[in-house]
Image (cartoon, coloured by chain):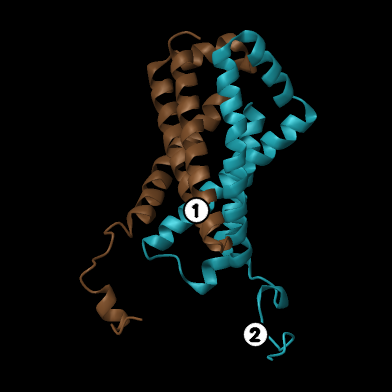
Amino acid sequence: MSLQTPLAKAQGLGSAKQGSHHWWAQRVTAVALVPLTIWLAFSIALIPEASYENVLAWFSSTWNATLAISFLIATFYHAALGMQIVYEDYIHKECAKVTMVVGTQLAMALLAIGSVVAVLKLAVGG
Amino acid sequence: MASTNRPLSPHLQVYRLPLTGLISITHRATGVFLTLGTLLLVCWLMSAAAGAESFASVQSFMSSGFGMLILIGWTFALFFHLCHGVRHLLWDAGSSFEKETMDQYAMIEVGIASVLTFFLWALA
């Protein structure tokens, strides 16, 4: 048993110095996603007949591909951050919580990379 | 031993959630739903990248009754989450906390999300 007070235990250890990083990352991605989401949703809705040729033609524009990839990266980052908060609020078993947070982060990373590769492939001609 | 059925302090189920509370939990629920829905977007992109045939099969699912229901629900959730997200940014900036405008803002969010969803599907 330690005779140190809780304060003495904590002093000198320092913080991880990233307490506000999650908060900021969620806000910055949110700000980026406001215009990107509206633009992408309406752009895709406006592709004539949503035919394969027209989808391919839409992604062949460098600007469209660039902004679509920006949307995908911001979205999956934002989703991973948001899901983490939900798990932390409702799952109280440490092991299950860490498993879900890390599992979701890996899944989001995989989906982000997969969808970016798909857009790049479409951008250079399918 | 302490009795297990001692009275507990009032919790969520004993009072009606104010509109702000209802909107708040909906924001979280739509966030989870949108995360699951990204799978659909990834499927759509992957199928297009794989070629015309796979794109056609995903597209036929999307344009089926069930597919359309999910897509319309997903886009409404998307626009609602976006609108309430903007309100969160306003709150972060320290504004729009007035009690009188709380419910008004909530109605505006739902209204704008509905209008955006309507126009999106009217144009599609």
* Corner quadrant of residue B23: bottom right
**A26 on left or right of A8:** right
Residue B9's tag is: 2
| Nearer-the-camera pick, A2 or A95 | A2
* Corner quadrant of residue B52: top right
Q: Is residue B50 visible?
A: yes
Provide the letter of the chain coloured cyan.
B
Quick one: label 1, few (<14), some, or many (20+) residues within 10 Å? some
Residue A7 is situated, as x and y percent measured from the top left of the image, at: 28, 80
Residue B58 is situated, as x and y percent measured from the top left of the image, at: 68, 20
| Nearer-the-camera pick, B40 or B83 | B40
Please say if B81 is above or below A91.
above
Residue at point 48%, 39% (across, down): A106
Total marks in image: 2
Which amino acid type is marked by label 2? Answer: Ser
Q: Give the secondary structure at mark 1.
A: helix
**A110 on left or right of B103:** left
Provide the letter of the chain coloured brown.
A
**B73 on left or right of A62:** right
Please say if B72 is above or below B54.
below
Chain at numbered mark 2:
B
Please say if A10 is above or below A62.
below
Q: Give the secondary structure at mark 2.
A: loop
Asked whether the residues under marks 2 and 1 belong to the same chain, the reply is: no
In the current view of this chain or complex, which residue is farthest to the right? B65
Q: Which residue is mark 1?
A: A98
Quadrant of the frame with the N terminus of chain B: bottom right
Which amino acid type is marked by label 1? Answer: Val
Residue at point 66%, 70% (across, down): B17
| Nearer-the-camera pick, A109 or A57 | A109
Residue at point 43%, 17% (across, down): A120
